[in-house]
Image: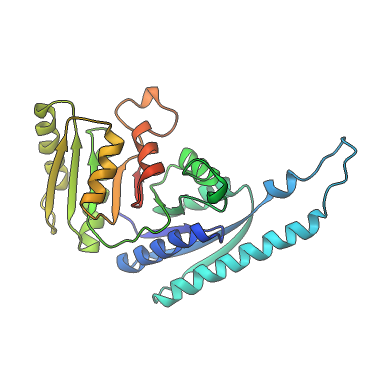
Amino acid sequence: MIESVLIATDGSEAAAAAENYGVALASRLGVRLSCLSVVEERVTRGLRAEGLAVDPPPVGAIDTFLEARAEAAIRRLVERARGRGIDASAETARGVADDIIVDRGKHHDLIVLGRDGEHARARTVLIGSTVDGVLRKTAKPAVVVPSGAGLSGPVLLAFDGSPGSKLAARIAVDLAGRLAEAIHVFVDSKDKGRSAARFDEVRRLLGTPTVPVREAASTLGRPDAKIVDAAREANAGMVVMGAYGRSRIHEYFLGSNSAAVVRTSPVAVLLAR
């Protein structure tokens, strides 16, 4: 299902985790890899003050710095890819970063992003504005990688019976088989009868996988916290879940559980679409 991967980097320390993770994933899957860095034009646009009689700083020098940083970031990423024997394509683009990433992502099966972005230390939330924009706009599956996350370990499938989680099940079994990692299925439900029905459903979706499958369920507590706990307990290398939950009509672009897991998980999270 996944034959091409796009890694987007801003060159920040936090982006290095996504670079390492994405390169390792592309290498283990044996897929085509593209590397992208964007010169964010909103930075220099925000420094102009037309009509206010305020002299702006030397925008040209700032723009030159941003371009040089983007080019350095893409060189670092390409070197990492070549170190794993991958001949990756590379592009430095100009524009609004999330829009450019979404556009380039249309030609790939998976987008890989660093969760925390270049302003992680100054922020009080756990997701960068560019990542948030990409996740809201893209129609492609995306992996969001927190700092320090590694690829090694089981694939945790969070299944709630929604259309998104059914797609996640197909992606999880494909990835786990190609990565030679076990699948841990986590089902959250308010009653045991519904849990049993969902396990029956996910078993049908998984078919006869070539890797071990383990199952766990819970009926108490917040679903997002339980998914994160289950990923920790399994020493998972990836959480795979639907981008939208069962009550999508009440949510804004991303499912509330999906957004909460992305914000708090110490493990990379793949949102299936």
Q: Is residue 201 above or below residue 36?
A: above
x and y, in percent, of residue 227 in the image: 26, 41
Q: Position of residue 60 (x, y in %)?
A: 80, 57
Against 161, residue 145 (above or below) is below
- Classify the position of the N terminus by image quarter: bottom left
- Residue at image x 54%, y 50%? 121
Q: Residue 168 placed where, x, y %?
A: 27, 44
Name the spot of residue 42 as percent of width and height, x first.
Answer: 68, 46
Q: Determine the residue positioned at 46% across, 72% down.
A: 80
Residue 87 in sight: no
What colour scheme has been applied to the protein in the rendered image?
rainbow
Q: Quadrant of the C terminus?
A: top left
Q: Residue furthest top?
A: 250
Whether residue 174 is visible, yes or no, is yes
Residue toward you, 89 or 119: 119
> Is 159 positioned to the left or the right of 209 in the image?
right
